[in-house]
Image (spheres, rainbow, N blue to C red):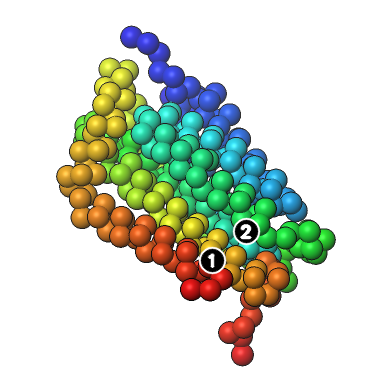
Amino acid sequence: MNPPVATPFFFYLLSGTMLIGGILVITRRNAVHSALALIAALLAQAGLYLMLYAPFVAGVQIILYAGGIMVLFLFVIMLVNLERSQKERQFNKQWLVGIAAAGALGGLFITIYTKGKGIFPDRAMSAAVLSDLELNNTQKVGVLLYGQYMFAFEIASLLLLVAIIGAVVMAKKRI
Amino acid sequence: MDTMLHISTLHYMVLSAALFLLGVIGVLTRRNVVIVLMSIELILNAVNLNLVAFSHYWQGIQGPNALHGQVFAIFVITDAAAEAAVGLGILIAFFRNKETINVDEVNLLKW
């Protein structure tokens, strides 16, 4: 039996990449640099999905986020003129209140996670079970998506249609 | 097992909470609308990471066919794509009218 690929080393490497990428996203002055840092964070997250035995979601993450949404972001950054906004201050007047609110939320997370550690007991899965998990993952997701979640899937297609029409209406000069 | 040498669901939850907080800080403090939208993407991705980690945990209980968290993550990605398209459309319309992309200058509705 092969040893599992999901070693702790890769978890800490990928999560470090994600956290550094996230910090760079919210601190860079140039929006293009933020977008590049976000791409790095999203690709590291795709690696974490692979570690969680979710290859289909990892593929969707790379194609849709790193390939689609980020291209859209870069396109808009190039379209709007950012020269002026780079020279201005980058944080708004309520930044102190914002950080205080985020700190309160962080305190809440820390309290819950330290007190509720026992709710999710650690279940180490055997290597045989783990190698079974990555078999036919895409097929299983597809069966769920087109079976049990058929209605939600149709609603998602409707949502995308509305988003297409909305984006065109918003961005068009004269309707 | 040693906590540093074994990756449990809680590890993923802590990472996800940290990313969520980074996204919240970005949304609340930045002025550039593009970066605010990117921070929203960070928040959605933190939630997705949690969903997939819980899906993996649930597979250990229910068997390999219990992939509901992954399906939910795919729906969240769909929503993120729709939100980015509409948000950037609004941003372009706003930039055409006011020649700025700072959120605190969006105050037409302010009394």
Q: Tag 1: residue type?
A: Ala
So how many labels did they put on this image?
Answer: 2
In this image, A10 relative to B68: left or right?
Answer: right
Give the labeled residue for mark 2: B34
Q: Report crowding for label 2: few under 14, some 14 to 19, many 20 or more residues within 10 A (C-alpha).
A: many
Q: Residue at x 56, y 46 (%)?
A: A71
The residue depicted at 55 percent of the width and 32 percent of the height is: A14
User: Residue under circle 1?
Assistant: A171
Q: Where is residue A130, by image quadrant?
A: top left
Residue A42 in the image: above or below residue B90 = above
Q: Position of residue B33 (x, y in %)?
A: 63, 63
Give me the residue at 45% from left, 43% from top.
A64
Residue B102 is left or right of residue B22, and the answer is: right
Q: Vertically, is B93 above or below A31?
A: below
Percent position of residue A31, x then y = 69, 52
At which x and y percent is residue A108? 51, 58
The three-letter code of the residue at mark 2 reads: Val
Observer-side mark, 1 or 2, equals 1
Give x and y (percent) for residue A113: 46, 48
Quarter of the picture containing the N terminus of chain A is: top left
In which quarter of the view is residue B109 placed? bottom right
Subunit ID for the residue under disc 1:
A
Q: Are marks 1 and 2 on the same chain?
A: no
